[in-house]
Image: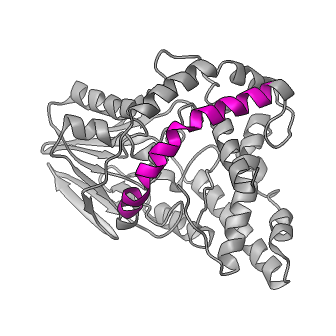
Amino acid sequence: MTTKSIRIALFLLVILQAGLTTTASANPFEYVWQELAPGVWAGIRQDPFELPQEGNSVFVITEQGVVVFDAGGSPLMGESIVAKVRSLTDKPITHVIISHWHGDHMRGLQAIQAAYPNVAIFAHPYSRDFIAATQERWLKRRVGMVPNIRKALDTALATDRDLKGRALIPEEKDWLLKGRSIIDQLDRENHRTTYVVPNATFADRMVLYLGGRELRFLHLGNAHTAGDVIMWLPQERIVATGDIVTAPIPLMTNPYSRDYAGVLQEIKALGFKTLVPGHGAVQHDTAYVDLLSDTFRSVSAQMKSLIARSIQKDDAIARIDYSSVESRFTHGDAFLANRFHDYVSAALAEATYLIESGAGITEEF
């Protein structure tokens, strides 16, 4: 098995393991809704690792219609957004803005568009083009993922070890044993998923003035992807970041590590009172943003030094020291420690090597 295929399989298995931390639900495709300010609602995944791993969503009710930021990662999640909106207002969803191209933030579009055929769907041009170029192939591949997850489950349960050879901690084994019914439901949802390409774009900035509200959508630079967009509500001092911020463990899928800390500092400079991450709980201070910034700065500085000393790629990746930040993410929790090693350690180091060595990174779907 190649390094890339191991990483993909690990990612799928980690999603599955983490998804079983909560009590089984009749519908695992659920948000917990929070009103952050009058008419501003956030749909939060109660467990950010829950299977299916879906991004958070935010919508804003105005006198002229409803604006949605991120549509969820499946038709059911999109349907849940529509249902929540309709429970609160008879105003239609007029705009959807996608934070980036990853499917867990945009595959609910089909449900929103079905309910509101005239909706305007915006994304950064990079994200729109990436969706148009790759999503049909991704959907074909995604339908075949469930057999791979089942195989990973069977292997882990038979050996009591994960794909990296680590002994399963008791909680992980229990989650694996409970997983099959959730996988079957995920399989059914995968088979009914289509894709919707955004029908409008903006490059760096878009501002909507609707019903007395101001909604700003900003591309601050490359971070989680090259097409990241945030939503900033200056009157309410609420920011929704997409996957630029994910918690409690960051998701490092080919991050643009050289620019990332700068983007985070621009978010901090907004002076937000409330931050809605792409995954994880709503935040009310800058502590986690600062921790992410510290992490990117530390790894970039270390990697520059290693490259300057002509240390080769694999050795350089292995030498990156996360000791100054890892415990601030994991707090001694074994489950979070495993997620840190799976999501962050090698992935961030490798991306940083490729960037600082001049090779560059390629976003993978």
Does 77 lie within the magenta span?
Answer: no
Question: Does residue 221 appear anywhere in the picture?
Answer: yes
Residue that appears at 32% across and 30% down? 79
Question: Does residue 39 appear anywhere in the picture?
Answer: no
Q: In the visual, does 65 lie left or right of 262?
A: left
Determine whether 270 is above or below 1 in the image.
below
Give percent across and percent down for residue 150: 66, 29
Pick whichever, 137 or 176, lies toward us: 137
Q: How many numbered badges does the structure rendering display?
A: 0
Pick whichever, 251 or 130, lies toward us: 130
Label the magenta part by its dominant secondary structure.
Answer: helix
Pick whichever, 300 or 363, lies toward us: 363
Give percent across and percent down for residue 323: 82, 56
Residue that appears at 78% across and 30% down? 155
Give percent across and percent down for residue 351: 67, 66
Give percent across and percent down for residue 127: 40, 61
User: What are the residue bounds of the magenta stretch?
Assistant: 128-157
- The quadrant holding residue 200 is bottom left
Residue that appears at 47% across and 62% down? 267
Does 154 lie within the magenta span?
Answer: yes
Q: In the visual, does 320 lie left or right of 72?
A: right
Pick whichever, 161 or 333, lies toward us: 161
